[in-house]
Image: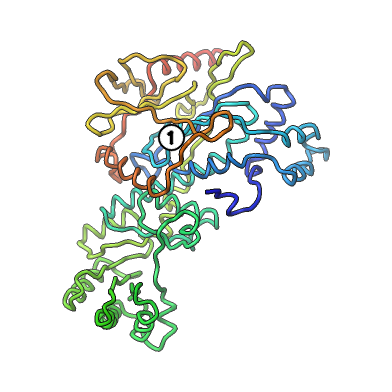
Amino acid sequence: MKITQDLYKSSLTLLTDLYQLTMAYGYWKSGISEKQGVFNLFFRDNPFGGGYTITCGLEYIIDFLNNFRFHDDDLKYLKTLKGYNGTPLFEKAFLDYLKKLTFTCQVDAIPEGTVVFPHEPLIRVQGPLLQCQLLETPLLNIINFQSLIATKASRINIAANGEPVMEFGLRRAQGIDGALAASRAAFIGGCSSTSNVLAGKLFGIPVAGTHAHSWVMSFESELEAFRAYAKVLPNNCVFLVDTYDTLEGVKNAIEVGKMLKDDKEEFVGIRIDSGDLAYFSQKARKLLDDAGFKNTMIIASNDLDENIITSLKQQDSAIKAWGIGTKLVTAFDQPALGAVYKLAALKNTKDQWEYKLKLSEQAIKVNNPGIQQVRRFFNQNKYQADMIYDSQHPLGNKHIIIDPMDPTRRKYIDSAKTNYKDLLVPVFKKGKPVYDLPDIRSIREFVQQEMGKMDKGLKRFVNPHSFPVGLEKKLYDLKTKLVLDLRKI
């Protein structure tokens, strides 16, 4: 699917920060624009205080890169930009260079829906320095948000424990783009449907929804409103019962449910959107059961998240489906994932790789060097540990994995006795797509498989277990040497 073309009908190449273009100009002017570089995209902490992250957004990235080129109107706009002294920011020859620019990078990525952890490269870009630099902002924009929402959706679905979770966040999302990306990521993370009809059209996500309070308020009585709705849409009857009095609303819904039953139609459910959800759901369940509607669902909404759902279940609520809006699509308690994109290697004039890292007074901000790959070890279909290693150096069978934040934390693994797979796979080679992108339902199913391979302690909402992730010892030693050498300088 050509997402960007379907939505915007125009180029998104200028979806970047100005400093990416000023650096690109600097590379070109300095004669190093074609110098080969490697950049890694990674994050430093799991969101929501959790024990894992779901990577999401690769389809958007593939679409963006397939359409990466500077159009005439892009260059016309860049020509108007001025420096502080009022002269053009970019000279004509550079804009001519951009006009002829063809994407030629190699891109490797961890497939969407994979469980990932801090410091692991989710995407690795290799190619001309100028091109790699221009990709930083759009790649981060896509991966940061969609991974955040997919992870939030996953947590909410853990709390729901197999019961359907419907994403209802369109009206509260951060704009059109945020709403569509959130609906997609939420479905991948485990939601069963969305209220967002455009997302249903674009991505093939099931859509769900019946009526709002305004429907009830448009009639002389609640009973009349329910009857009218059942007459118009007998195949979509979930009644919102809390417009005036919740329990009276349930009784009115039951009366109309009997009418539906006589017409051999299904009384699907009721929705409660306010008040004491545990109390009202229990009372509603009894009323429904006593009336013979034991299969009629009770759906709850009203600013829910994983913590509120957990609490409602502890209170023995009778809710069996969940409508989640604001706190899902806005990632309510953590507005950003914080992924970064760092230069990790450059080729010198002898065609040899020189590894790079950024120093910082904060250890967590000292990035890992090298052309990295992530090897995941597992036994009996359960994940054991992840090792970040340099793909340019051969590995033996015995590995020491060292936590980059605490070198005293080490794990010893014999790959001859342990199953493993490398997570980063080719997506683009020489600028051409080579990845067979799965459909959205397959990605969603993959997330469920991934969740089943994790230790339960990683899924706790409070003080989750920490999954073993570390640098292979040779890469750790190389990083230490680079740090010490740079500190001497």
Where, by quadrant of the figure, is residue 76 drawn? top right
**Is residue 256 positioned above or below 129 on the image?**
below
Residue extending farthest bottom: 220
* Residue shown at 25% from the left, 79% from the top: 261
Residue 67's x, y, as percent?
61, 42
**Is residue 483 positioned above or below 200 on the image?**
above
Q: Quick one: 350 or 22, which is closer to the camera?
A: 350
Which quadrant holds the C terminus? Answer: top right
The tally of labels here is 1
Say few, some or many: other residues with alpha carbon within 10 Å of mark 1 (under 14 / 14 to 19 / 20 or more): many
**Is residue 295 positioned above or below 1 on the image?**
below
Name which residue type carries label 1: Ile
Residue 454 in sight: yes
Q: Quick one: 345 or 62, which is closer to the camera?
A: 62
**Is residue 231 positioned above or below 395 on the image?**
below
Residue 487 placement, left or right of 112: right
* Residue shown at 34% from the left, 70% from the top: 274
Residue 18's x, y, as percent?
67, 39
Residue extending farthest top: 350
Residue 193's x, y, as percent?
38, 59
Residue 131's x, y, as percent?
63, 31
* Residue shown at 43% from the left, 53% from the top: 332
Residue 342 in sight: no
Residue 251 placement, left or right of 75: left
Look at the numbered disc 1 and give the secondary structure of its residue.
loop
Where, by quadrant of the figure, is residue 302 drawn? bottom left
Colouring convention used in this rendered image of the protein: rainbow
In the rendered image, which residue does mark 1 sit on?
A: 110
* Residue shown at 55% from the left, 16% from the top: 353
Residue extending farthest left: 290
